[in-house]
Amino acid sequence: MNTSTKMIIVLTLIAALSGSVLSMWDGVTAPLIEANRLKVLKAAISEVLPTYERYDEVQVRDDIILYVGKDTSDATVGVAFKAKGNGFSPDLTLMVGINPDFTSLTGIEVLEQTETPGLGNKIEEDEFKTQFIGLITDEQKAKVVKNVKPDDPTRGIQAISGATISSKAVVDIIWSQIDVVRELYATKVAGS
Amino acid sequence: MAKQNSLKIEVLKGIWAENPVLIQLLGLCPTLAVTNAAINGLAMGLATTFVLLSSSILISLIRNIIPAQVRIASFIVVIATFVTVVDKFLAAYTPDISKALGAFIPLIVVNCLILGRQEAFSSKNNVGRSILDGIGMGVGFAAVLTLLGAIRELLGEGSIFGVALMPESFNTWLVMILPPGAFLTLGLMIGLANWYNARRAEA
């Protein structure tokens, strides 16, 4: 057997073996990975829609899924959606909960962030996140104030000291999505 | 063929005399990137050890049928297979660690430590020796990563493996869990190892 043929045979064999091992292993792990993903998603939704019992998943646009939270009597208690953007570092993803009228927030949860440890990553702490509960979501964007509590806690939040950019980014990311989501909810979910 | 090491040396060399991180300075990218906590260092160390050991076994078994011209390609396919196995395993069973290590698990494929051991050792030695070499190098790598992670976590968060060890009044050194902390700590560790080895050589 000449070298070229041997090269082809050996590499083909190794690759085929590798492929079959991986496809078998994927069969074992894929359901577990999917279950983990769902668990994280559910935990985030229950964080931002505290009164929900179950949720309906509605794909309203290619890139937007709404999680419509219902209580035991099937009334809508709020809508959760993912909002993505950039913080001080890229790739900040939030889960945002809003009441059914789209007038105020019911909570936020940080799904993914790469902000600076010790500064920007404090956006994950409850002290920061709970400020968003009850924030009014009309066209007037919530104000981010430094060092003091906002005059009106339904209109503003206090920035994390040393991490104004990360704090502002959270507000910006939420507001960048609210109008789109409100529109889509009205036409695709509430209207139908 | 060069004079063969004793079997004991074959294991021990990876842990100290030829430690992959402190002496050979191989695989520094994951070493610096993921060691912001002891658990992350340990997880990366164990994942790398698994890939190294499995690849060493397989490569040394098939070393005589791999044509020299395609040996690197064959090594990489074998390594990539084991890395994917580990990646899926962590994502399925330990999602938190999988999230913390992020892209650095798939990047074990290009860890020069693993490819280096296949090229330098497993492709030239029998299975028994390759297993010993893989264990030694893997443990040496994992030990340094865990120690590095423990030092950075202790100073940066006041804890090791999440267990608080520092007094309440301890002011954490934030820099230690940021990238500069990795360079500072690793530099000092390599310096200490060199200093120790140099003193021993003199004595």
Image (cartoon, coloured by chain):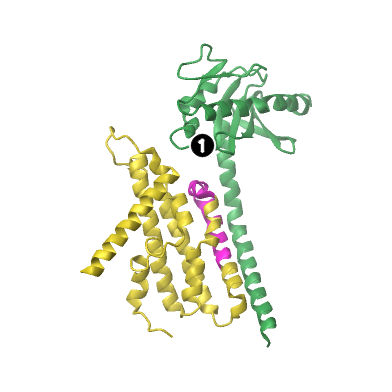
Quick check: B52 above or below A49? below
**Which subunit holds the residue at mark 1?**
A
Rendering coords of residue A159 (x, y %): 50, 23
Identify the residue at horizontal 27%, vertical 36% (top origin).
B167
- Residue sitting nearer the eye, A170 or A131: A170
User: Which residue reaches farthest top?
Assistant: A151
Q: Which residues are magenta?
A: B79-102
- Residue sitting nearer the eye, B145 or A107: B145
Crowd class of label 1 (few under 14; some 14 to 19; many from 20; radius 10 Å):
many
Q: Secondary structure at mark 1?
A: loop
Residue B104 visible in the current orientation:
yes
Left or right: A38, with B169 as reference point: right
Shade of chain A as shown in the rendered figure: green
Identify the residue at horizontal 28%, vertical 60% (top origin).
B195
Which residue was labeled with disc 1?
A115
Rendering coords of residue A12 (x, y %): 67, 74
Rendering coords of residue B6 (x, y %): 34, 79
Q: Quadrant of the C terminus of chain A?
A: top right
Quick check: B14 above or below A117? below
Q: Amino acid at mark 1?
A: Glu
- Residue sitting nearer the eye, A107 or A150: A150
Q: Quadrant of the N terminus of chain A?
A: bottom right
Chain ID for yellow = B
Q: Can residue B90 be found in the magenta stretch?
A: yes
The number of discs equals 1
